[in-house]
Amino acid sequence: MYDVVIIGGGVVGSSIAYHLTREGRAGRVCVVEPDPTYEFASTPRAVGGVRRLFSLPENIAMSRLSLDAYRDFEQLMAVGGEPAPIGFRRGGYLFLYSPEQAAILERNFRTQRDLGCPVELLDRDGLKRRFPSLGLDDVAVGCHSPEDGWVDPYSALLGFRRKAQSQGAVYLEDRVVGLEVSGRKVSAVSLEKGGRLGARAVVNAAGAWAPEICRMVGMRLPVEPLRRMAYYFETRAEVEPLPLTKDLSGLFFKPEGAGFVGGLPNMAEPAGFNFELDYGYFDRVVWPSLARRVPAFAAAKLQRGWAGLYDQNRLDGNAIIGPWTGGLENFHVACGFSGHGLMHAPAVGLAVSELLLDGRFSTIDLSRLGYRRVVDGTPLSEQGII
């Protein structure tokens, strides 16, 4: 019998396991992960950005906590004196807005400043002086968050996992194929290899695979796997140091090694477990958009790329965190991050551990991100944020 069984050992599931075992109050914790190599997991295929540029106070608060955790991660996750480096870099974030979108940006900026975020507004002239390589013909204003940054996703995942194991969490290489129900609770988890795990509480942190787990007990989850492609390219042209830059078309790019990583997710793409990399999409869509935003990228040379999955929440694009409201009392979800799982993993791990151990959120109140909004059909969406 386990006190908590976590389905999914990616960065979110492993952060939950770490926080649950940190003080020894959780009892026996087991994480079920079918692939310890994480070949198709979303975390290692992420870009790694961590930002406070949101409109919802909950997302801003989670990013603030996660930034502090990633800043100190190397020592926090040290095991036996061996640190856990994740390449944390405060390269900054920059969001760009057209004249029509400027009012939304200014409203978000006020919210961010009111919550203590060190952000700055830059008009077109200010942007040109600070980042002369940017193409700004369609841009009126930008929001720069210089203390935001990025981490190496795979290292963060392994750091959480290794630390959780050192604190007593058990990781099983297996796949969940069924959930046994007794009354209004999950009583056991059935495994592909034939095992069975008794459980006092179950957390579904299976990312893009989370809907499959929820269907086992009849829980409706508005989450779908959505392919997201990223491309690494280099250019010989001189470009000043740039932050991770995004505009509301979805285009993004950030410095990476000797070049840049960038992409432009197609949010209208059919849902599915598609890991095929489309080089033609780079030529048709991404490269022209990059060249408009940074003219020097017109001479970019594509080196490689990869495809990963968002666990896209089609209701509102935000995470669903907490118990199954109106359903099984001890069945919790932490999914639907829509590309922000790595970004918010430290905060989510802490929040879910508080919920399981104390019955309430203490550090950050994430009640509005619970399943109730799915039941009620009331989206909680970001405004002017991709």
Image (cartoon, grey):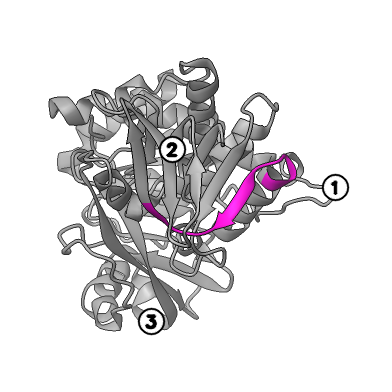
Residue picked out by circle 1: 80
Residue on which the image places disc 2 = 203
Looking at the rendered image, the disc whose residue lies closer to the viewer, 2 or 1, is 2
Could you tell me which residue is drawn at 49 percent across and 35 percent down?
A: 199
Q: Name the quarter where the N terminus is drawn.
A: top right
Q: Which element is circle 1 on?
A: loop
Image coordinates of residue 226 in percent, x first then y, are 26, 59
Q: Bounds of the magenta span?
A: 165-177
> Label 3 is placed on what type of residue?
Ala
| Quarter of the image where one finds residue 87 | bottom right
Query: What amino acid is at disc 1?
Result: Gly
The residue at 59%/38% (across/down) is: 29
Residue 78 seen in the figure = yes
Q: Are marks 2 and 1 in contact (CB under 8 Å)?
A: no
Q: Relative to 290, does residue 217 appear above or below in the rendering?
A: above
Q: Is residue 113 above or below residue 274?
A: above
- The location of residue 45, given as percent across then percent down, is 45, 64
**Residue positioned 72% across, 39% down in the render:** 167
Could you give the CA–CA distance between mark 2 and mark 3, rounded to whole angstroms?
Answer: 47 Å
Crowd class of label 3 (few under 14; some 14 to 19; many from 20; radius 10 Å): some
Residue 299 badge: 3
Marks 2 and 1 sit apart, C-alpha to C-alpha, by 29 Å
